[in-house]
Amino acid sequence: MKKVLIVGDGKSAIIDKNFIDYLNNKNYIFDILSFKEITSNKYNKIYSIPQVINNKFYWFNFLRFLFAFVLKGIRIIRKYDIVHFHMFYPGIFFLTPFFKKNVVLTLWGSDVLKSNKLKKKLLGYTLKRVNRITCTNPSFLKKVVEYYPFVSNKIDAFPYMLKYIELVNSSYLNKTYSNKTRIVVGSNSNFAQNHLEVLKAIKESNLDVNNLHLIIPLSYGRCSVEHKLKITNLVKSINCTYDIIYKRLNDKELTNLRLNCEVFINLQDTDQLSGAMLETLCADNIVITGSWLNYDVLKTSGIFFYEINKISDLTSLLNSMNFNNRPNNRKIIVRDYLPKNVLKKWIKVYEEAL
């Protein structure tokens, strides 16, 4: 059995539900160096780093985190057959002198697209030292290669194993239908989800508020209390029924959310490939997204979804939309994104990193 060290946010569903659950027991033993305190029986060993708290002592907390991360990393990374970094963090740069030819770096999107010049330089140096690089979207892969041409022969684009695609697919016949149009706005509480702009566009539309039900998931992500209050007040002002979700949903609840909505609005600033969007497409429900997100890989596969060029265009689209006209995307999503069909690609990356 090969020993693998995962480095990243251990509370992230991407790592916890969409990766470890599928690769565990595939000839690998996993430990984790987590940026947050976690308890889990999925790992052989857990190393945790003090979380950065955003308060008046932010820079002290950040430097403490960075020092602890680098010190712990130096001590342990050479013990593993494979070291897999999930998302680039500047602290990884300080570990590069200790890399062996066994390092995998998975880019999440914002770690490249939202980087300043210094962070991009640190990332470039780090990319030279890693053995394999992955991302989830071919369009994003092209951008990475444009920034860093030297990575062209060691980067691949394919998704994580998305657990909820498996659950949505197996529960598809349990879909329910409502007299109201159920619209899900965003997938988390991050500012980049643009809740306020989307909700204003919905408010300005001609949708019948008596037949409208809004669902706003705010259960995770970076968002101030004040911003959540603005979202709540704006939803109330639309005068329709609504649910604002603050708690983390269990598997059944999240599967039902994907299955039992008519529309999912995904108009965030940047993204590689939204899991929530793919899960909604698998349920044959309507997705509205932004042309700036470059989901060309889905178009090439024949998947249908609505695109707008700017958020203000949402109002006119909603006014003209027939919500009973559902797409048929499920077969394509299952073919391309069902976990068992993606798993072999991840195993190949690990084999090439050894």
Image (cartoon, rainbow, N blue to C red):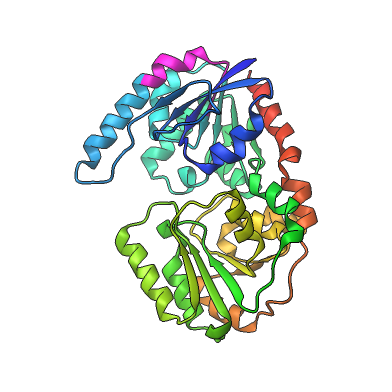
Reply yes or no: does residue 113 show up in magenta: no
Q: Quadrant of the N terminus?
A: top right
Task: In this rendered view, identify the residue nearer to me: 301 or 340.
Answer: 340
Q: Is residue 84 above or below residue 101?
A: below
User: Residue furthest toward the top?
Assistant: 79
The percent coordinates of residue 21 (x first, y second) are 62, 34
| Picture quadrant where residue 131 is located | top right
Q: Is residue 34 left or right of residue 260?
A: left
The percent coordinates of residue 10 (x first, y second) are 47, 35
The percent coordinates of residue 61 (x first, y second) are 25, 36
Q: Is residue 146 visible?
A: yes
Task: In this rendered view, identify the residue nearer to me: 52 or 40.
Answer: 40
Q: Is residue 325 above or below residue 245?
A: below
| Picture quadrant where residue 246 is located | bottom left
Residue in the picture at 32% in, 32% down? 50
Residue in the picture at 79% in, 48% down? 335
SS assignment for the magenta stretch, majority = helix
Task: In this rendered view, identify the residue nearer to me: 119 or 164.
Answer: 164
The percent coordinates of residue 260 (x first, y second) are 65, 65
Q: Is residue 153 visible?
A: no
The magenta stretch is 72-84
Q: Is residue 258 left or right of residue 313?
A: right
User: Residue furthest toward the left?
Assistant: 56
